[in-house]
Image (cartoon, helix red, strand yellow):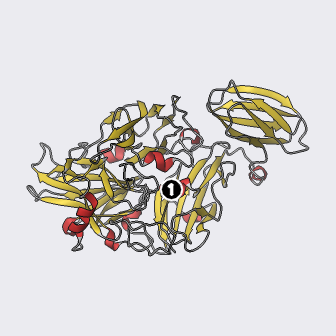
Amino acid sequence: MKNHFFLLLLLIIGSKSYSQNALFVPDTLSGTNFVLTMHEDSVQFFPGNKSHTYAFNGNHYLGPTLFFQQGSNVNIVVHNQISDTTTVHWHGIHVPAIWDGGPYSEIMPGDSWNPQFTIMDHAAMYWYHPHPDTKTAKQAIKGAAGLIIVRDPIEAALILPRQYGVDDIPLVVQSQQYDSLNQALPRGMQDSTLLVNGTLNPFLNVPSQIVRLRLLNASGERTFNFGFSGNMSFHQIGSDGGLLDVPYLTNRVRLGPGERAEVLLNLSSMNGQTFYLMSYASELTMGVQGGPTMPMPLGYPNMNSPLNGVDFNILQLHVGAQTAQPILSIPSVLIANNLLNPANANCTRTIRFTADSAMVMDGPFYFNDSTFNMERIDYQIPINNIEIWKLINETMVAHPFHIHDVQFYLMDRNGALPVEGERGRKDVVLVPPGDSVTFITQFTDYADSLMPYMYHCHILMHEDDGMMGQFVVMPASVGVNELNKPYTNVCAYPNPTINFTTIKTPSGIGEYQLNVENMIGQLVYSIIGNQEEQFLNTTEWPRGMYFIKIHNSRYRQSVKIIVR
């Protein structure tokens, strides 16, 4: 730890609060029927003004932890009681595109959304958070997020800590910047306030036995290099989407925004001792947000947070007596991950991370030189395709790449095997400047030629600025010739709309059937037309997303519209 740590600590909390606070552990919901109500709230983090927050279900910050059982069918009702349009994305969960909660699944103020899906995921910790186009940072950074813990029979057969909040502790770690009025800044790059489960300056009492910590980096942009004081070793047992094959003995786990890890600590001989969860940020490389600050030319935004490039404490842990039935050993074997064979891959895709120039540090950033466009589908992927994706970072900034719908396995980092902690199921991978990463995945179970999934940088301001793309998983009935056609040659304007929209079709297609369906497939409007422009009055349509489907004997296309 660097000598100026205590000076740093004073810089961070000196004008705010010296008191320590017991770590808040989110309450839980379990079963198959869930109700989540997003609402506006406030928290007295600092003296003076309260900080405006978003939360779920009566909490002041964050939401309840949802317990899902693999194989169960869940029914979720989400109520939007904030004064803004929102969505809820089930980060890492394998769901049909229509229930994924991306930018298309808007929930208007005062409205509700009712996703229903089967839990097909492996035991792990996932999370939920808003995902509206251009407003994800604004909402997620204010506390509109919560955890999901999936149980499955394989994990249940292992002897592991599972007493939620006692020896199985969820940790939502965030680094934020607040303005002079104590309000969180969605684009704050001088972040120096640390929250764990929404708690400022937290401490936690843990028993002297095997303790399981579930780590989530929910920051807008900061990467954490997690470890413990005294370079204490621990075993990493899981990554984003499931357990590793065997516990990985280490003393560091680096997590970019959106990444998760599960670790086991053996505290059986530490009764009465105190230690810290830390970030060893001095070991991060330049260009990784949280590492040493890169010198910025005159006129560029200030990114010099006092947390950058130094080691700092995150959570104080006090070790006390054992519980009645303590776990005192760590399994030597966990699960058998079924790795995909690269020889069976149907295709390889390359995604370059780019910017307008090498000096860009705060965005905008792009994928393959293109910014996000809701009217453009970047990839049409046939159902059951096994694909290799190569990510190449040509910018000066590290980017955590997240893909919806699937979990993937890393094949290499810069041509070398990834560290053991990254050899499990993943849905986010941090790609430092100049690096390349290759992963393999398969697109199974859910096909929908209209509703896309997202892939994006999980630095929230980069995502909101357009570092995002989208893909559809195409049904097996779609032939090769249809896949090779331009996906969108029908357009709608204005879109989104309030009272009307005009549908423009290509010239020369002749008479066609135009059907309008809502998000659950109900037909709300139908007409036979032959004009290139068809006017639709949407005044009486409930708010939400609709699919405009146009077809005849030789032509079939569709477009999505949002009615506000």
Q: Is residue 487 above or below residue 279?
A: above
Q: Nearer the viewer, residue 495 or 189?
A: 189
Q: Residue at x 47, y 70 (%)?
A: 432
The single residue placed furthest to the top in the displayed view is 540
Please tell me in which quadrant of the rendered image residue 288 appears: bottom left
Counting from the top left corner in percent of width and height, residue 28 is at: 32, 36
Q: Nearer the viewer, residue 501 or 319?
A: 501
Counting from the top left corner in percent of width and height, residue 461 is at: 50, 56
Q: Is residue 251 above or below residue 181?
A: below
Q: Residue at x 71, y 29 (%)?
A: 538
Q: Quadrant of the N terminus?
A: bottom left
Counting from the top left corner in percent of width and height, residue 130 is at: 48, 43
Q: The residue under label 1 is which amino acid type?
A: Met
Q: Which residue is mark 1?
A: 461
Please tell me in which quadrant of the rendered image residue 240 appears: bottom left
Q: Residue at x 74, y 26 (%)?
A: 525
